[in-house]
Amino acid sequence: MRPSKAALWTQFHRDMLEVSGKPFGLDAGAADLKCYPLFSTETYWGIDIGRESLERGLGRYPDAKAILADLSTVPVPANSVDVCVSTNTLFQLDVEPRLSAIRTLCQAVKPDGIMMIELNNDEAIEQTLKLLQDNFSQLDISYFGNKLSRLYEKILQRSDGKMPGYAGSRPFLAISWILSRLEIAGRKTSTVRNQIYIKAQGKIAQGKPVLFDAKLYEPIGDRLYEPKQTTQ
Ligand SMILES: C[S@@+](CC[C@H](N)C(=O)[O-])C[C@H]1O[C@@H](n2cnc3c(N)ncnc32)[C@H](O)[C@@H]1O
């Protein structure tokens, strides 16, 4: 277990519990729907560019639906999403496509909706925060990945970047737990931290909430859709 990730997910879990029972949840960068169990929204849709992983997740969760699409170009109806999530994904997009994806997600959130996203504290963070500030009046920003956790993770991690099996043994879990508590205690300190988790709400551009429907998408499999091709 990586202490920084554990801390970030503890925070994310808490926030997801607070929004349970909302109608519509969107998971941007859903992969095999790993986050599905955290959504207690009435409806769950995931978006990802990986068909295989989406199909694996859809096989596991019979209520879920998914869109096979690139987040930087996917159309999502404005004001249609109650709970919008993107974890461990946006850092994979180059800056311009990333900002485009975040713009789409901001627009998709309903006026009383909420967005929770994970970002890397990289060269685009100021631009990204500005975009979020332009769209939401309340940003709860948490910083994770302090020097101590990163040192622990660096010492333990294998050459392929993964943590070794023994990191899951009791003594290491105990160390990791202590480090993750330190992360949570210091989550408001931005210096030397490489991961950012943001809960955004209080949408500034008020619009009429709309029902998310599948009109923009066409089916390509069991509960799997892709954006309709628009003719020029
Ligand atoms: C590490 S997984 C994250 C899965 C899950 N959200 C989590 O937190 O574990 C990152 C996912 O982002 C997807 N992804 C990367 N770039 C994307 C893009 N431009 N559009 C849609 N999905 C993308 C990948 O296919 C991958 O499934």
Image (tube, rainbow, N blue to C red):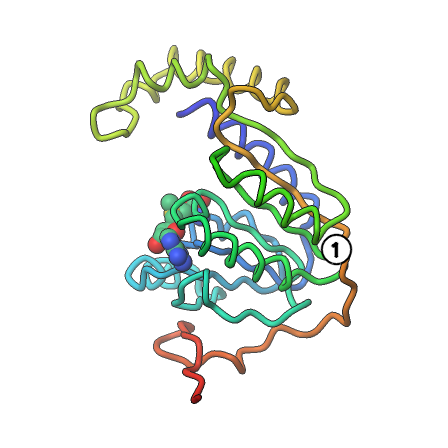
Q: Which quadrant would residue 33 be assigned to in this image?
A: bottom left
In the picture shown, does residue 120 fall above or below 52?
above
- Image check: 106 left or right of 169? right
CA neighbours of label 1 inside 10 A, class few (<14), some (14 to 19), many (20+) = many
Some atom of ligand 1 lies within 8 Å of the CB belonging to the residue at label 1? no
Extreme-left residue of the structure: 159
Which quadrant: the C terminus? bottom left
Look at 44% across and 56% down and name the residue there. Answer: 97
The residue lying toward the viewer, choosing from 213 and 75, is: 75
Which quadrant: the N terminus? top left
Extreme-bottom residue of the structure: 231
Is residue 32 in sight in this rendering? Answer: no
Q: Which quadrant would residue 152 be assigned to in this image?
A: top left
Disc 1 marks a residue whose amino acid type is Lys
In the picture shown, does residue 169 fall above or below 65?
above
The residue lying toward the viewer, choosing from 30 and 196, is: 196
Q: Secondary structure at mark 1?
A: strand
Number of marks drawn: 1
Residue 196 location (% of width, % of height)? 55, 34
Residue position marked by numbered label 1 in the rendering:
203
Is residue 101 in sight in this rendering? Answer: yes
Look at 56% across and 32% down and name the residue there. Answer: 10
- Image check: 192 left or right of 218? right
Q: Which quadrant would residue 13 be assigned to in this image?
A: top right
Look at 63% across and 21% down and name the residue there. Answer: 189
- Image check: 140 left or right of 161? right
In the picture shown, does residue 49 fall above or below 213?
above
Residue 121 location (% of width, % of height)? 50, 33
Look at 48% across and 48% down and name the residue there. Answer: 35
